[in-house]
Image (tube, rainbow, N blue to C red):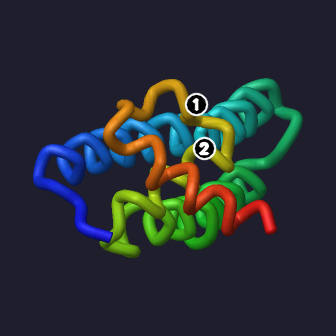
Amino acid sequence: MEISKNQKRHLRDLAGIAYERDLSRCLYAVKNNFDKWENNEITVWDMNDKIHEFHNTIARDLYKSYVDIYDPLLAVAFGIRQGVLDISEVNINCKPMVEDILAVFNK
């Protein structure tokens, strides 16, 4: 399947948007832990563990899913599956490619 430069650019832009939204969604959990720490509901050591857990697992997994795969088409499909992108955000020239990848994911 040949992807034009314009399609690649659009998919890279969408992948970046998805990555940012997904990372933001996950950071809310970290923020909630900071709130718990500030309210003395968890210790500083618990907070430290939460930060390391986020950095060593969630943040790295997201990076691998959106950046390290070097395929913006897969990254966009992943973002849709994660619920941080909607298929309506994909332009008409790229939508059939994304739908084909989503069909494989849905099997």
Secondary structure category for the residue under label 2: helix
User: Closer to the camera, 14 or 34?
Assistant: 14
Near mark 1 (Cα within 10 A), the count class, few <14, some 14-19 or many ≥20, is some
Residue 28 shown left or right of residue 98 in the figure? right
Q: Amino acid at mark 1?
A: Asp
Q: Relative to residue 7, is residue 24 depicted above or below?
A: above
User: Closer to the camera, 59 or 17?
Assistant: 17
User: Closer to the camera, 26 or 75?
Assistant: 75
Q: Amino acid at mark 2?
A: Ile
Near mark 2 (Cα within 10 A), the count class, few <14, some 14-19 or many ≥20, is some
Q: Quadrant of residue 48?
A: bottom right
| Image quadrant occupied by the N terminus | bottom left
Residue 75 position within the rendered picture, expressed as x and y whole percent measured from the top left: 46, 58
Q: Residue at x 62, y 62 (%)?
A: 58
User: Closer to the camera, 13 or 88?
Assistant: 88
Q: Quadrant of residue 37?
A: top right
Q: Relative to residue 61, is residue 18 depicted above or below?
A: above
Q: Which mark is residue 80?
A: 2
Q: CA distance from mark 2 to mark 1?
A: 6 Å
For this orientation, the residue located farthest to the right is: 41
Mark 2 vs 1, N-terminal side: 2
Residue 104 shown left or right of residue 75 in the figure? right
Q: Relative to residue 87, is residue 65 depicted above or below?
A: below
Q: Residue at x 57, y 50 (%)?
A: 99
> Disc 1 designates what residue?
86
| Image quadrant occupied by the C terminus | bottom right
Q: Residue at x 77, y 61 (%)?
A: 106
Q: Relative to residue 49, is residue 17 depicted above or below?
A: above
Q: Is label 2 in contact with label 1 (beta carbons under 8 Å)? A: yes
